[in-house]
Image: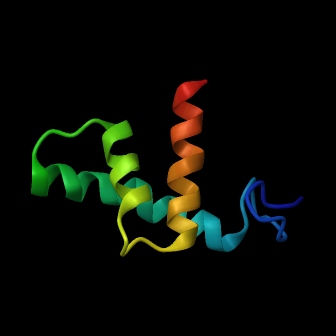
């Protein structure tokens, strides 16, 4: 199976790099809510995508997760 984002060998639907980034993005939401107060998931993902300190894999995950919300 190939990663749906980059085509590398996948461990699930994602490669090990995107899978790790997904776990970190999902876990980070709680910390952002604690730091900034109430924040919608979509707003959080938008901030992750546009943060200059966010890595490329995390940005790709945020984009993917945001797209899943639109479905």
Viewer-proximal residue, 43 or 37?
43
Q: Position of residue 2 (x, y in %)?
A: 86, 61
Name the residue located 48 percent from the left edge and 61 percent from the top edge.
23
Identified at 64% across, 73% down, the residue is: 17
If the image is split into quadrants, where does the C terminus sit?
top right
Point out the image quarter for the N terminus.
bottom right
Residue 68 in the image: x percent, y percent?
59, 34
Q: For residue 16, what is the image quadrant?
A: bottom right
In the image, is residue 35 above or below residue 38? Answer: below
Residue 61: quarter of image: bottom right
Going by the image, does 7 lie left or right of 21? right
* 6 and 23: which is toward the camera: 6
User: Against 26, is 17 above or below?
Assistant: below
Question: Does residue 38 appear to the left or right of 66 in the view shown?
Answer: left
Residue extending farthest top: 71
Residue at the image point whose x is 21% and y is 40% from the top: 39
Q: Which colouring convention does the figure follow?
A: rainbow
The answer to whether 40 appears left or right of 18 in the picture is left
Pick the front one: 59 or 3: 59
Q: Tell me if 45 is positioned left or right of 39 in this view.
A: right
């Amino acid at each position: 199976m190939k990663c749906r984002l980059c085509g590398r060998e996948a461990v699930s639907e994602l490669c090990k790099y995107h899978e790790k980034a997904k776990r970190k993005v999902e876990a980070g939401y709680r910390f952002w809510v604690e730091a900034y107060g109430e924040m919608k998931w979509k707003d959080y993902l938008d901030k992750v995508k546009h943060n200059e300190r966010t890595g490329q894999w995390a940005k790709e995950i945020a984009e993917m997760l945001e797209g899943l919300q639109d479905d």
